Image: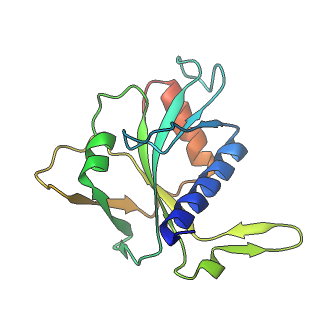
């Protein structure tokens, strides 16, 4: 398998494990023409929100490059993805998730008799309030290391979506 495709598949597995732990359903569109790789949905009434069966959508990116500087991941995002993810005029909250993996494929997973460990870490960013740019090819966005994507974070994102908001 192509190394980039391996990264994509690994990240799907990573975020799907988080979503399963958070009790969320997952869905994917056959065609990714709106920069959405995966959608998560909660069933029925969720949290204290007013919106039933809330959803969130995520663009997945995975890299083994050293992109960390000043407590952020400096991620070069294609302008199409940037424009699709930014703005407040979408019904479903959208997020960018960047998974950092070791350069060596053999270090992505550690298997033990009683558990498995996935390496390394995934972080998220909302581009909801980002404005337009004059860039034509890409925009480097800063994904804070403190915004770690976890099952609890997915739960919080869904809770905010049920209230008609996003993080």
Q: In this rendering, does residue 4 appear at all?
A: yes
The residue at 32%/48% (across/down) is 81
Residue 152 location, x and y as percent?
A: 62, 47
The residue at 48%/45% (across/down) is 37
Question: Quadrant of residue 116 in the image?
Answer: bottom right
The answer to whether residue 73 is above or below residue 154 is: below
The answer to whether residue 73 is above or below residue 132 is: below
Residue 106 location, x and y as percent?
A: 65, 81
Q: In this rendering, does residue 167 appear at all?
A: no
Front residue of this view, candidates 85 and 22 = 85
- The extreme left residue here reads 134
The answer to whether residue 136 is above or below residue 41 is: below
Left or right: where 60 falls relative to 43: left
Front residue of this view, candidates 69 and 81 = 81
* Colour scheme: rainbow
Q: Quadrant of the C terminus?
A: top left
The residue at 29%/32% (across/down) is 88
Residue 110 location, x and y as percent?
A: 73, 75
Residue 84 location, x and y as percent?
A: 30, 41
Left or right: where 126 falls relative to 57: left
Question: Quadrant of residue 86 in the image?
Answer: top left
Front residue of this view, candidates 83 and 72 = 83
């Amino acid at each position: 398998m192509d190394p980039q495709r391996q990264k994509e598949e690994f990240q799907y597995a990573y975020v799907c494990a988080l979503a399963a732990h958070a009790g969320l359903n997952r869905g994917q569109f056959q065609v990714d023409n709106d920069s959405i790789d995966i959608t998560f949905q909660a069933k029925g009434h969720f949290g204290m929100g007013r919106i039933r069966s809330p959803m969130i959508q995520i663009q997945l990116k995975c890299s083994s490059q050293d992109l960390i500087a000043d407590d952020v991941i400096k991620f070069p995002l294609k302008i199409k993805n940037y424009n699709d993810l930014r703005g407040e005029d979408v019904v479903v909250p959208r997020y960018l998730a960047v998974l950092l993996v070791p350069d060596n494929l053999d270090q992505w997973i550690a298997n033990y008799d009683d558990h498995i460990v996935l390496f390394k870490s995934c972080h998220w960013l909302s581009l909801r309030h980002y404005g337009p740019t004059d860039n034509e090819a890409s925009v480097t966005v800063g994904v804070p290391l403190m915004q770690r994507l976890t099952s609890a974070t997915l739960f919080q994102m869904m809770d905010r979506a049920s209230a008609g908001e996003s993080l």
